[in-house]
Image (spheres, helix red, strand yellow):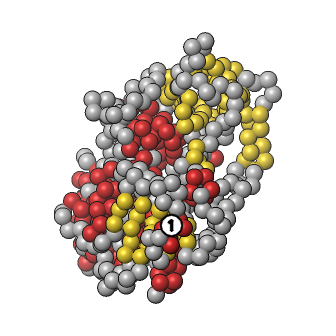
Amino acid sequence: MSLDAEAGEVLAPFLEKKRQGGIGPRERMAVPAQEMPAQGPEQRRRNMDEVALGYSENQARLEAERCLGCKNEPCVKGCPVGVPIPRFIAEIQQGDYKAAVNVIKEANLLPAVCGRVCPQEKQCQAECTLGKALKSVDKAVAIGRLERFAADREREQGRVSLPAVKPPTGKKVAVIGSGPAGLTVAADTAREGHDVTVFEAFHKTGGVMIYGIPEFRLPKRIVQADVDGLGGMGVHFETNYLVGRTRTIEELLKKDRFDAVFIGAGAGLPKFLNIPGENYVGVQSANEYLTRTNLMKAYDTERAATPVFRSRIAAVIGGGNVAMDAARMALRLGAEQVHVIYRRTREEMPARAEEVGHALEEGIIFDFLRNPARILGDDKGFVTGIELQKFRLGEPDQSGRRSPVAIPESEYNFDCDMVIVALGNESNPLLTRNTPGLIIDKRGRIVVDETQKTSLDRVYAGGDIVLGAATVILAMGEGRRAAAAVNRLLA
């Protein structure tokens, strides 16, 4: 029996009992959590199509009925942008999916994106009363999946509507970067009637959602639809425009007469291991690898205009979502084996549990408590392997995770022909070096106050260029705070 049919068999008597007034918290807690339909592992590991297929209507209605409708709304407190979660779920319970997505858009104009890539299990769902009562975040209401369902339903039915835009104020806002933070600022300031221009260094808009997150996790048509929506609100986009080179922030303010500037340029400078052998052919950052395969579609060998290194045995260094994306991409590009090398255990991995689970299903091999000491190569300069050292877990570090401790004389050689380094990114110094008076910290991140204002008058910043590598929704949260400050400034 299909997941849809199973949900339908439970849903019909539940709704009948609900009509008769016989549904309480105990009955809701007994409703089974709905599994997300997905492509099978053997099928998906050789295509670029989206892995998670989305809830059916029966599944969405049944999952929504699990919500207890808590008056104190703990889930909202766990959402970085403050989506009115119980309200939108209540609309799904009533079968009014358009009303549901309208409620979401009060706080978030990227619901189809966030429903797919946000770490709900660490945010809204971590605070869910149902999950806590059942003693498992996996049994919390699937808020992200319901958000995706409502957004997808609106788009598929051709009923997408845009927020109301106030009359023009005559004020101009420049947004640097079209990633999650920048798009959020553009949306929230455009609503107030300001003339908004987004400057994007790449030839396509969407930031990390386009160049960083693979098609099989976030289809690019979804991102493009949301960008097109902003265009419908009057937001202008300038691509191939590198602020710091094409134009400075000072020129935007003084020559182009923008009344406020938001910097959401992201963190695009990859970190490396700084070990011997990193210059061998076959070593690359996850940033470059994913940009080639996502933004430039190097996987499409017949039409792509950029090459991509193809391997037999690939090693990915790191344990975050980017490492999972790179590993799963390498598998789809034909690698016979893909190993994820991580110096802690699965319990300490920062990657989403769902992404780790998908990687395991697809055959990715995890080598835990290992870390490279040096990269090995041949006399022609090509990677032939890695010297790995074994580790054990010691005491917790500042983040609360147990620190890895090297085991003496435990080194051994591991054969591979490609190494992808996925250790996070730092801020690209181009913009900050060309902006006098802009204060940054020792890691090159822009320093802001509680309103996201920088050290410069009328200049705000948010997202990865402030946080370091973060999630889409955290970047959007900073964008919302910055937009609110800009709107107060220009009121």
Q: Is residue 478 left or right of residue 439?
A: left
Residue at coordinates 68% horizontally, 54% vertically from top-left? 443
Residue 269, above or below 362: below
Q: Residue furthest top?
A: 379
Given residues 173 and 346, the one toward you in this image is 173
Query: Can residue 185 be seen in this snapshot?
Result: no
Give residue 240's position: percent from left, percent from top. 40, 52
Residue assigned mark 1: 251
Taking depth in this image into account, of 167 and 434 the one nearest to the observer is 434
Residue 317 is situated, as x and y percent measured from the top left of the image, at 59, 35
Horizontal arrangement in the rendering, residue 413 relative to residue 203 (left or right): right
Taking the spot 21% from the left edge, 59% from the top edge, the residue there is 156
- Residue shown at 63% from the left, 38% from the top: 272
Please, what is the three-letter code of the amino acid marked with disc 1? Glu
* 219, above or below 391, in the image: below
259 or 59, which is in the foreground?
Answer: 259
Q: Is residue 303 visible?
A: yes
Relative vertical location of residue 65 with respect to residue 310 in this rendering, above or below: below
